[in-house]
Image (spheres, rainbow, N blue to C red):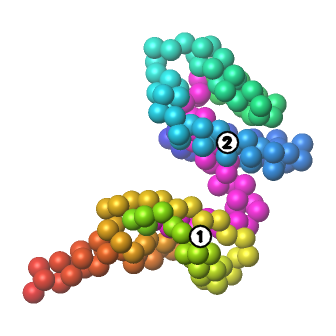
Amino acid sequence: MSKRAAIRYAKAVLQKAGENNTENVMFGDMQSVHATLESSEELQSMLQSPVIKVEDKKEALLKIFSNQSDLTKNLIHLLVANQRLALLGDVAESYISLYNNAQGVKIAEVTTAVPLTSELENTVLAKVKELTGSTSVTIKNIVDTAIIGGFILRVGDLQYNASIANKLNRIKREFTLN
């Protein structure tokens, strides 16, 4: 339920930013908000905490994001007024996704056991552009040592799993079936 609410807030913010011709500014703000919340467990805990007063949460967020646009600050005020402050990270993530869709940007999630090198990133980028036909592609690298090696590529609804863990599981299934 909260994910749908976050999408509704993000759509409203995108619409308001469109009216003010500040979609790009808001995109930068939402990337900053999302990155800040993702990198700080303390901040996430504070937003979820029922013990901390809502006014204290609002004051902290307005100080943390003091360099952001007025629309971002208005969003914080709105979420406080509607008792939905815990949705801030989801709203930011939803805004980024909606903005990218509106701009025709494809997001390619590449899960690897180790971080991508710039050379490999360029190769993946070229392949995704070829597969999707999109000229605007962004790569998001997720590091997951559980896949052992290889990679998992996700672009929208498409997924290609070339991980060592997947190949081992496939071999294991073949042996157990025989």
Q: Secondary structure at mark 2?
A: helix
The dot on residue 78 is none
Tell me what residue is drawn at x 70 percent, y 61 percent.
Answer: 101
> What predominant SS class does the magenta segment belong to?
helix
Tell me: 102 left or right of 84.
right
* Image coordinates for residue 82, horizontal then vertical, percent: 63, 24
Along the line of sight, the residue nearer the viewer: 29 or 113? 113
Furthest-bottom residue in view? 178
Residue denoted by label 2: 32
Residue denoted by label 1: 118
Q: Quick one: quadrant of the C terminus?
A: bottom left
Q: Residues within 10 Å of mark 1 (few under 14, many from 20)?
A: few
Tell me what residue is drawn at x 24 percent, y 74 percent.
Answer: 169
Tell me what residue is drawn at x 56 percent, y 37 percent.
Answer: 37
* Image coordinates for residue 142, horizontal then vertical, percent: 48, 59
Tell me what residue is drawn at x 65 percent, y 55 percent.
Answer: 97
Residue type for callout 1: Ser
User: Is there any visible trace of residue 176 in the rendered image?
Assistant: yes
Along the line of sight, the residue nearer the viewer: 58 or 94? 58
Up the image or down, 67 lies above or below 57; here it is below
Q: Secondary structure at mark 1?
A: helix
Please tell me in which quadrant of the rendered image residue 122 appears: bottom right
* Image coordinates for residue 108, horizontal then vertical, percent: 57, 68
Residue type for callout 2: Ser
Mark pair 1, 2: CA separation: 23 Å
Look at the image and give the residue range highlighted in magenta. Answer: 82-111
Marks 1 and 2, the one that precedes in the sequence = 2
Q: Is residue 101 magenta?
A: yes
